[in-house]
Image (cartoon, rainbow, N blue to C red):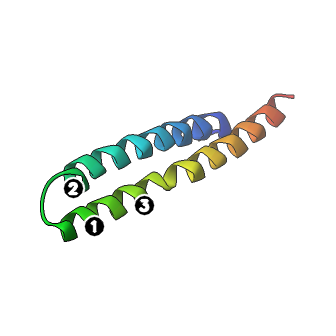
C-alpha cells in the first residue's frame, strides 16, 4: 500500500471513529438503561472518539511522505 492510499484510509478511519463514537453514545449511554450502563456507554463513546485525532495525525504524516515522493 503506498503512502497516499494509507493517508486516505487513515482519514476515513478518523471520520468513522467520530461517527462510531456518536452512535455508541446514543445507543449505549445516551438515554437508556441504568445510570451505570449510561456511564459505561458514555466512557466507551469518548474512548472511541479519542482515536480520531490519532488517525488524522497519522494521515497527515503519510500525506507529507507521499508529497515528498512526488517531488
Q: Residue at x 49, y 36 (%)?
A: 12
Q: Which mark is residue 47?
A: 3
Residue 5 location, quadrant: top right
Which comes before the other along the chain, label 1 or label 3? 1
The answer for how far apart the CA atoms under marks 2 and 1 are is: 8 Å
Q: Nearer the viewer, residue 22 or 5?
A: 22
Image coords of residue 45 (percent x, y): 35, 56
Give SS at disc 3: helix
Figure quadrant of the C terminus:
top right
> Which residue is under mark 1?
40
Image coords of residue 59 (percent x, y): 63, 42
- Extreme residue in the right direction: 71
Give SS at disc 2: helix
- Extreme residue in the left direction: 33
> Which residue is under mark 2?
28
The answer for how far apart the CA atoms under marks 1 and 3 are is: 10 Å
Figure quadrant of the N terminus:
top right
Amino acid at each position: 500500500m503506498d503512502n497516499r492510499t494509507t493517508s486516505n484510509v487513515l482519514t476515513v478511519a478518523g471520520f468513522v471513529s467520530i461517527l462510531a463514537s456518536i452512535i455508541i453514545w446514543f445507543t449505549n449511554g445516551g438515554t437508556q438503561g441504568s445510570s451505570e450502563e449510561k456511564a459505561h456507554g458514555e466512557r466507551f463513546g469518548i474512548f472511541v472518539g479519542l482515536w480520531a485525532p490519532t488517525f488524522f495525525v497519522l494521515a497527515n504524516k503519510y500525506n507529507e511522505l507521499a508529497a515528498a515522493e512526488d517531488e
